[in-house]
Image (cartoon, rainbow, N blue to C red):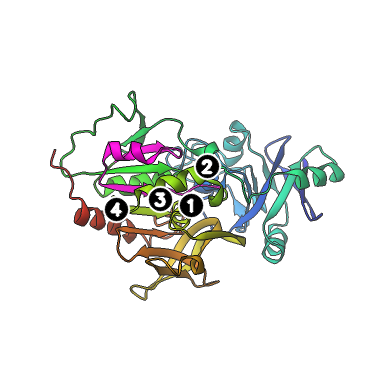
Amino acid sequence: MKALLALEDGTIYEGRSFTGPCFAVGEVVFNTSMSGYQEILTDPSYCGQMVTMTYPLIGNYGINEEDIESERIQVRALLVREYQEFPSNWRSQKSLAHYLKENGIPGIEGVDTRAITRHIRLKGAMKAALSTEDTMESLLEKARMAPDMEGCDLVKEVTCKNPVLWRDGIPVRMNEGLDQFKWPERPGMFRVVAMDFGVKYNILRSLEKRGCTIVLVPADTDSASIDLLNPDGLFLSNGPGDPAAVTYAVETIRNQIGKRPIFGICLGHQLIGLALGGKTFKLKFGHRGGNQPVKDLMTGKVEITSQNHGFCVDMESLRETAVELSHINLNDNTLEGLEHTKLPLFSVQYHPEASPGPHDASYLFDRFIEMMRKHHPPADS
């Protein structure tokens, strides 16, 4: 079934839908990972975006129930060069097409993904519309009328609606409110509150594996509610959209700084920058993939990292604060990590939990554990 993709600048690409009749509007971005399409599909940081995979063969190992990173598919559409209809992998439980269809997400193959990627690298990520039925003129109009990513708060679409306890690798619904919650009796475990801006499951798995009991709270949770829980540490998750639009979270974080150890990833990192008085800006085409080189300025080591973001903290806006640049991206020298010189607070722009991607940066979770151990030893009961 023929499908058209229209970018807001008037560029048109033609492909075929392998999921049936479809329509979608969103920002078109590209991901350079060679595998991990299931994790990419379910990463909440992709909310509002159509993802182009630069690796040409997608779908060859199918879909399983274990490798999801949230409760549903988050992307608006998936664009690939060649779709593999019949998966060959012992873990596969269904085909990629079946998975997309049951979630109502378009899958398009046969598009020139190399041309799309080169165009976005030159012109920048941009709004687009995709359809199997609309005319070219209609699609262009819909692409141009779509909301801009700048100024868009997409966190409200992906955050949990009510507090959740992460227990034994799965989210467990809490029957009581935060004012009645009592931490489980787990001696020696660190008590962590995670603000959910669109958290990936493997982040929570990584924390729990290191001895953390985690309560996931909605993005609009205020500082007083976190104080009521009195956690050993505060974790700020990844998420989609423009960090400058998530003003309610910035206020909460500002009030939490200095009270307890804080670790932020991706959007959480950007929100820390804003809470410290800094500014953020939109990157031309973002960093998305499992092969982004980052230098740790504290050790001099270079890490190959997994990334997915379109915004960045402006380090110049933080020059007058007690914050140091800790990591830089070696492709464009943008800020990838910061650390407070006086308070127990640090954050990174990339994803140390990977899924998909390398595990070079997993030590950052250990750093958070050590920070909590130093400033707030775990409860014995």
Whether 126 is drawn above or below 155: the answer is below
Instruction: Tell which circle, 4 or 1, labels the residue nearer the N-terminal end.
Output: 4
Tell me, yes or no, whether the two marked residues, 2 and 3, touch with CB atoms within 8 Å: no
Q: Quadrant of the N terminus?
A: top right
Percent across and percent down for residue 309 are: 54, 56
Name the one closer to the observer, 28 or 252: 252
Name the one closer to the observer, 245 or 108: 245
Give the CA separation, mark 1 to mark 2. 10 Å
Q: On the image, numbered disc 3 is attached to which residue? A: 254
What range is drawn magenta here? 214-240
Callout in the foreground (3, 4): 3
The number of callouts visible is 4
Query: Is residue 209 shown left or right of residue 154?
Result: left
Instruction: Tell which circle, 1 or 3, labels the residue nearer the N-terminal end.
Output: 3
Q: On the image, numbered disc 1 is attached to which residue? A: 267
Q: On the image, numbered disc 2 is attached to which residue? A: 155
The residue carrying pointer 3 sits among few (fewer than 14), some (14 to 19) or many (20 or more) residues within 10 Å by Cα, namely: some
Callout in the foreground (1, 3): 3
Query: Is residue 144 shown left or right of residue 321?
Result: right
Name the one closer to the observer, 98 or 381: 381
Callout in the foreground (2, 4): 4
Give the CA separation, mark 1 to mark 3. 15 Å
Instruction: Tell which circle, 3 or 4, labels the residue nearer the N-terminal end.
Output: 3
User: Tag 3's secondary structure?
Assistant: helix
Give the amino acid at mark 1.
Leu
User: Tag 2's secondary structure?
Assistant: helix
Give the amino acid at mark 2.
Val
Query: Is residue 84 shown left or right of residue 278?
Result: right
Please tell me the numbered disc located at residue 261: 4
Q: Quadrant of the C terminus?
A: top left
Tell me, yes or no, whether the two marked residues, 1 and 2, touch with CB atoms within 8 Å: yes
Name the one closer to the observer, 281 or 370: 281
